[in-house]
Amino acid sequence: MAERTPVETKNLDIYGHEALPWSRAHDLLVTSATQPNVRFFLGTVRPDGRPHAAGIGALWHDGDLYIVSGAQTQKSHNLAANPACTISAVLEGLDLILEG
């Protein structure tokens, strides 16, 4: 798969700084996604509108972030009904939130 870039980037700091270059987050994902100390969290929405958050396994491969989830889990049911979600990770020197 060809490497993709985000449609939009935003720095969520309180100081109004410019967004960090995507290459910084990308390089950290490539090198950190398989490290045991890097945690990923998935945010989804239940059919009744309540939020749901769960720690997930994740793997960066060929330009895509893959997540692990069993077919009968709440997160899988939520994603089947509504694929909009967030994935958050604490990488070295960078808190990253992906929305999609």
Image (spheres, rainbow, N blue to C red):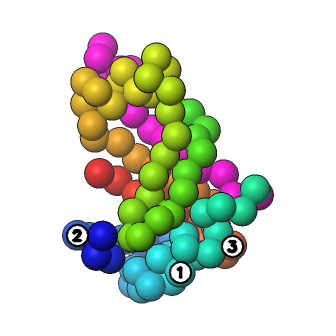
Residue 48, how many percent across, how many down?
30, 14
**Residue drawn at 62 percent across, 75 percent down:** 31
Of 81 and 16, the residue lying toward us: 81
Residue at horizontal 53%, vertical 81%? 27
Q: Which residues are magenta?
A: 37-53
Frontmost residue, 42 versus 30: 30
Q: Earlier in the sequence, mark 3 or mark 2?
A: 2
Q: Which residue is mark 3?
A: 92
Query: Which residue was labeled with disc 1?
Result: 27
Q: Position of residue 28 (x, y in %)?
A: 58, 76
Gap between marks 1 and 3, in whole Å? 11 Å
Three-letter amino acid code at disc 1?
Asp
Residue 3 sits above or below residue 96 on the image: below
Looking at marks 1 and 2 on the same chain, the residue that comes earlier in the sequence is marked by 2
Rendered residue at 33%/31% (across/down): 79
Q: Is residue 45 magenta?
A: yes
